[in-house]
Amino acid sequence: MTAHDGSPDAPRLGTQLETPDEQRLEELRTNLAAVNARIERGCADAGRDPDEVTLVVVTKYFPASDVLLLHRLGVRHFGENRDQEAGEKFRAARHALAEAGESELTLHFIGQLQSNKAGHVAGYSDVVQSVDRSKLVSALDRGAHAVDRRLRLLLQVSLDGDTARSGVLPEAAADLADEVAGRELLSLKGVMAVAPLGADPDEAFARLRAVADGIRARHPDADWLSAGMSADLEAGLRHGATHLRVGTAILGSRPSLL
């Protein structure tokens, strides 16, 4: 796995952020270890190597101090879905890491994204996992050119046919993939989906895998499959997930005041 517990703690971060809470650190360490154990068991059951799997810890609604604590525990991939919150939080976290001489992190934007905010998101995110329409591709492309940086994209696929809740229909995914692949500063990396509420996640992720296989046949480098969250990560692993998006199982219930 890309992120794992057990790596030595980084030096204390002398930053403008509050002093790390040791109780919170231990809580996150315990939860992260439990999730990693689930991933290892899930990979063993699926006959897969855990090193093929990247854990993206979803920190939406949680403070930058939690990002820094998770970084101490070896996490390098983080997920957010609200533009304003993510931009402010990760500017603070990256500044703190730079001051401490620590290694960089990778930020995945995973939420529904409005075209008028795409340029801003392109300026601080490394990966956008929620691309579902041509207008958004164009907006992200303009944003990437404005800051002259390459942006990695995943197509979000609708598995319930309701595009109002985000996601490109499976039958339209190949054309959208071709459009992303044709942009100079956009890198098509694969697909993402959320299992519909009440649906069998195995059935849902099997359909996602079929879409992913079709796109990869046309674009061999698009080999990421983001599927599986706190409640259904094992199903994601059974169907080839390379990226898992886990929040609640590691960070707990969202703060009530945010």
Image (tube, helix red, strand yellow):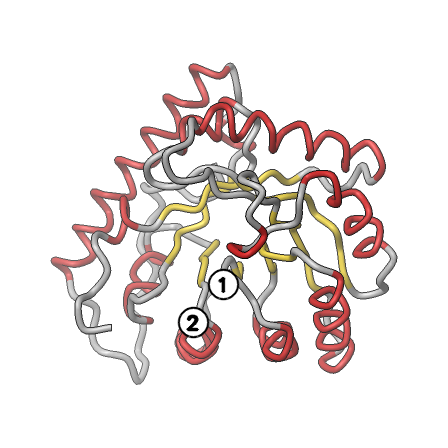
Q: Position of residue 100 (x, y in %)?
A: 40, 73
What amino acid type is highlighted by mark number 2?
A: Leu
Q: Residue 97 shows which numbered tag?
A: 2
Secondary element at image label 2: helix
Image-quadrant location for residue 20: bottom left
Q: Nearer the viewer, residue 126 or 71?
A: 126
Image-quadrant location for residue 216: top right
Which residue matches tag 1? Answer: 103
- Residue located farthest toward the bottom when viewing the structure as drawn: 16
Q: What residue is drawn where x is 38% and y is 46%?
A: 246
Q: Residue 205 shows which numbered tag?
A: none
- Vertical position of residue 29 compared to residue 195: above or below: below
- Residue located farthest toward the left when viewing the structure as drawn: 23
Q: How many marks?
A: 2
Q: Mark 1 to mark 2: distance in Å?
A: 7 Å
Q: Position of residue 32 (x, y in %)?
A: 29, 43
Left or right, 248 with respect to 235, comes to left
Q: What residue is drawn where x is 39% and y is 26%?
A: 40
Q: What residue is drawn where x is 60% and y is 59%?
A: 127
Counting other residues with Cα less than 10 Å from the Cα at mark 2, is it few (<14), some (14-19), or many (20 or more)? some
Counting other residues with Cα less than 10 Å from the Cα at mark 1, is it few (<14), some (14-19), or many (20 or more)? few
Circles 1 and 2: CB atoms closer than 8 Å? yes
Q: Where's the C terminus, which quadrant?
A: bottom left
Image-quadrant location for residue 71: bottom left
What amino acid type is highlighted by mark number 1?
A: Ser
